[in-house]
């Protein structure tokens, strides 16, 4: 998927696009994993227009992926101040666009963001029963680092793995030359 474009979410129209994508993707993907009641609760709590607007006012950065004027997926990242890490809070792709490189392009975008900001690690949480996503994250270089159970209210919990990926810093400042360092070579 070489012609998909990643746009930052800043306008009310883009927020509405994200809300629409979230409903479609979550209903299809998560109902079999966590059930309709929890999906509906989580969409209202975390992916409504008001929730996304509030998150953007905090430190969340949302992006949407578009191809041929059609929204295919979205992501949200949260830089952690005081830590050299970036939380990949959300990365979702419509069923019809999965397996075409859209998710990989979003992840590469997040990794590039880390390199530009000198952030050394990306982490995320993923439902323990979300086998396909866990397998994809593993193929992308993430490893499981913890098992978490978080109460999210109304009797619902998120039963997740925390997964992390180290980010190589390909953009490095030049190393200062030291006069006392012997030359390398014969």
Image (cartoon, rainbow, N blue to C red):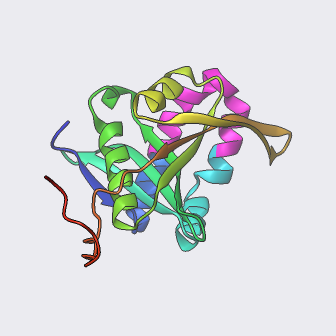
Provide residue 128's location: percent of width, then percent of height: 66, 27
Q: Residue furthest right?
A: 155
Q: Residue at x 19, y 64 (%)?
A: 183
Above or below for 119 versus 4: below
Q: Nearer the viewer, residue 4 or 125?
A: 125
Q: Predominant secondary structure in magenta?
A: helix
In which quadrant of the rendered view does residue 125 lie? top right
The N terminus sits in image quarter: top left
Instruction: Report whether residue 134 is seen.
Output: yes
Residue at the image position 48 percent from the left and 43 percent from the top: 165
Name the residue nearer the viewer: 159 or 57: 159
Q: Residue at x 60, y 63 (%)?
A: 50
Up-down: is 149 above or below 62? above
For residue 156, which quarter of the picture? Answer: top right
Viewer-side residue, 19 vs 107: 107
Q: Is residue 150 left or right of residue 132?
A: right
Q: Residue 9: x percent and y percent?
A: 39, 62
Residue 44 inside the magenta-drawn segment:
no
Q: Quadrant of residue 171?
A: bottom left
Place of residue 110 in the rendered image (x, y in percent of width and height, measured from the top left): 38, 53
Between 40 and 84, the residue placed more toward the observer is 84
* Location of residue 144 in the rendering, given as x and y in whole percent from the top left corner: 60, 33
Q: Is residue 181 left or right of residue 103?
A: left
Can residue 35 be seen in the rendering of this structure?
A: no
Residue shown at 62%/45% (left/top)? 43
| Residue 25 magenta | yes
Vertical relation: 6 (above or below) 164: below
Q: Is residue 5 left or right of residue 76?
A: left
Q: How many marks?
A: 0
> What segment carries the magenta color?
21-42
């Amino acid at each position: 998927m070489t012609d998909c474009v990643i746009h930052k979410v800043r306008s009310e129209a883009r927020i509405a696009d994200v809300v629409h994508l979230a409903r479609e993707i979550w209903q299809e993907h998560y109902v079999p994993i966590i059930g309709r009641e929890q999906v509906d609760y989580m969409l209202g709590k975390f992916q409504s227009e008001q929730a996304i607007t509030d998150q953007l006012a905090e430190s969340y950065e949302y992006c949407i992926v578009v191809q041929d004027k059609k929204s295919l997926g979205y992501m949200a990242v949260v830089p952690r101040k005081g830590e050299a890490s970036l939380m990949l809070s959300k990365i979702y792709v419509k069923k019809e666009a999965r397996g075409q490189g859209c998710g990989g392009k979003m992840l590469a975008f997040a990794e590039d963001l880390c390199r530009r900001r000198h952030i050394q690690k990306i982490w995320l949480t993923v439902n323990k029963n979300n086998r396909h996503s866990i397998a994809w994250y593993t193929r992308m270089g993430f490893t499981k680092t913890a098992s978490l159970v978080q109460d999210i209210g109304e009797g619902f919990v998120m039963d997740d793995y925390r997964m992390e990926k180290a980010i190589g810093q390909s953009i490095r400042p030049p190393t200062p030359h030291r006069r006392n360092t012997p030359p390398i070579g014969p």
